[in-house]
Amino acid sequence: MIETLDRALSRVQGLLADPQLVRRICLSGRARGRKPDQIRVDIRPVALKSGLYWQMVSHDGERDITKNVAVDQLSIKELFALGYANILIESTSQELSLRLTKSGDARVSTRQVALEKAELSHDRAKERLLGADDEIFTELGISDYSGKLKPSRSNKFIQVQEFLKILKHSIDERVEKSQELKVIDLGCGHAYLTLAAHKYLTNRGYKVNTLGIDERQESRERNISLVEKLRLSKEISFHATKIANLDLMSVDIVISLHACDTASDDAISWAVKSGAEMILVAPCCHHDIQKQMRTPPSPWNIATKHGIINQRVGDIITDSIRAAVLKILGYRTDIIEFVAGEHTPKNLMIRAIRTGTPAQSGDIQELKQTIAQWKIEPALITRLKDELSVRLG
């Protein structure tokens, strides 16, 4: 929903009336032409001897700066005016996301949740689903051998932590509750997320079998050597093959971080055909549909005649179609910010959890109209032709 920025910020401020019902607030991203001194601000309520305060933790890319603010002195409008583009506020009953539009208005989305109240202890350790001193970070070169995070690798560490937060929330929403999980990382590269996901789920008490797929043989050999050092070779294995050539198999969770162009479609298609319960895909390099956008429907030429805008419109259409296809095929699907843009420009994630919900005629019609208007042939629809044929007609 689009609304004026002042109205949206007033709505956000209103959610802070009872701090004890607020779990966290996050300001991130840059407004156009602005550069905040801190790349991200995380806020939560804390209980001190003198009463309740807001604890603000600002991150500049290398270190955290913490200060406490009286509950009646926190102004979201003033903080946002420092140059941020996004606000996320999570309360016990709803999650609200605000994103600044190019026109200066606010795009606001909300969803209902049912969460426990936040831990108000002032001395609570920073939430790290895997600590910097975990041995996987040492072997990956993110931390030194004393377990201290290397400043030059802080962005990668934050990326992993943000991914684990998404995995945590998603695993809590699983339809199936088996304690045995099969996890596949399609396009695993140097296995940062492969190892982190495996270790986190194992720590949660799951029995996990993990497979990493990458077409480069040198990546496979490096990763095998890595898991041998970590004594995890019985639980984690690696194959060198293209995603499109991988045999289908039973799987619970499919992750794919920055598989380039139609490799993201290969990953989604493989996951759907294998009956994956959960799909977490961060797409990258959306060239396929961008190349097909030769005759944009009216009045889109106002945007697509500009190269960089045409590229971004292509990105939006590509990922929107991917999300729509997954919804039609029985997945509860959303597109979320994976990690703040300052840490990586490739910061969107498609999250899909299989529910088996029947396709809605309105969703099918929207997908058909989008394809017809743009005169495109999305790679994902080609790959899932048989699965979609019954529903699309």
Image: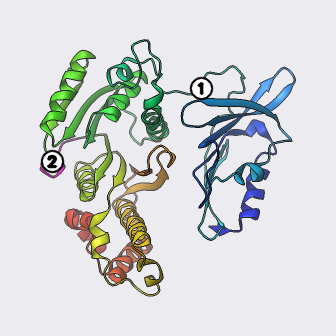
Q: Position of residue 350 (x, y in %)?
A: 40, 53
**In the image, which residues are magenta?**
243-250
Residue beneath the point at 40% across and 17% down = 144
What's the amino acid at mark 1?
A: Lys
Compared with 32, 157 (above or below) is: above
**Alpha-carbon span between mark 1 and mark 2:** 39 Å
For disc 1, the marked residue is 126
Q: Position of residue 28 (x, y in %)?
A: 60, 48
Disc 1 crowd rating (10 Å Cα; few below 14, some 14-19, many 20+) is few
Whether residue 179 is visible, yes or no, is no
Whether residue 288 is visible, yes or no, is yes
Left or right, 393 with respect to 282, comes to left
* Label 1 residue SS: loop
Q: Choose the circle earlier in sequence order: 1 or 2.
A: 1
Quadrant of the rendering where the C terminus is positioned = bottom left
Q: Position of residue 289 (x, y in %)?
A: 30, 70
> In the current view of this chain or complex, which residue is farthest to the bottom?
298
Residue beneath the point at 38% across and 39% down = 176
Quadrant of the rendering where the N terminus is positioned = bottom right
* Label 2 residue SS: loop
Left or right, 225 with respect to 95, comes to left
Left or right, 36 with respect to 186, comes to right
What's the amino acid at mark 2?
A: Lys
Q: In front: 153, or 266? A: 153
